[in-house]
Amino acid sequence: MNIRTLCVNGLLAAMYIAVSMLIQPFGFTNIQFRISEMFNHLIVFNKKYVYGIVLGVFLTNLFFSPMVAYDLVFGVGQSVLSLLITIFSMRYIKNMWARMLVNTLVFTFTMFIIAFELHLAFDLPFSFTWLTTAVGEFIVMLVGAPIMAAINKRVQFNKLVE
């Protein structure tokens, strides 16, 4: 990994943490609106953003989650799994909007992992928790897609990392 890619991913991780801090009370419950999850769409532009996204999730969960041990396993695991599925699907999907839709659906569906985590940690009902976390993730990812597309027109995310 070159210095530029390393620096961009470090900045991405820092932005993920900063945005997560803004909504901390709503980012770790059974109704999650972690706005920083919109950064997951960066993977659509270049798979090398996986490092910054995963590092951001890891550090956010390490320092700010009320259930650190669970979140480091389940939260980071859900992000890694979802990102890898999206990266794999990008071989077959070339359209940016289609990629963002698939990414949104993958992250929404895999919220069952977070629901399972919350069930284990707080004995919350699995199905209802999956529904509420999935709805929150879906809304954030859906609203985040046009925001990330608009920013991409100015910044050109695919050219920031090499």
Image (tube, rainbow, N blue to C red):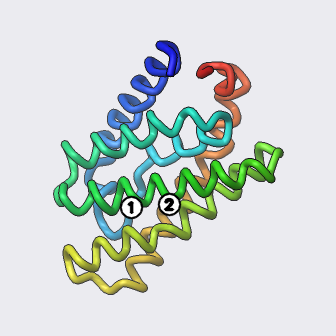
Image quadrant holding the C terminus, namely top right
**Sequence-earlier tag: 1 or 2:** 1
Q: Amino acid at mark 1?
A: Gln
Q: Amino acid at mark 2?
A: Glu
Q: From this view, report whether residue 21 is shown above or below residue 151.
A: below
Q: From this view, report whether residue 38 is shown above or below residue 27.
A: above
Residue 79 image-quadrant placement = bottom left
On residue 3, the disc is none
Q: Residues within 10 Å of mark 1 (few under 14, many from 20)?
A: many
Q: Position of residue 119 (x, y in %)?
A: 28, 79
On residue 32, the disc is 1
Q: Position of residue 117 (x, y in %)?
A: 30, 71
Identity of the residue drawn at 47% across and 48% down: 37
Q: From this view, report whether residue 130 is shown above or below residue 20.
A: below
Camera-side residue of 91 and 10: 91
Q: Position of residue 13 (x, y in %)?
A: 39, 32
Residue named by callout 2: 137
Task: Determine whether label 1 and label 2 are within 8 Å by CB.
Answer: yes
Identity of the residue drawn at 33% across and 70% down: 30
Q: Report how far apart the C-alphas of labels 1 and 2 lie in the structure.
A: 7 Å
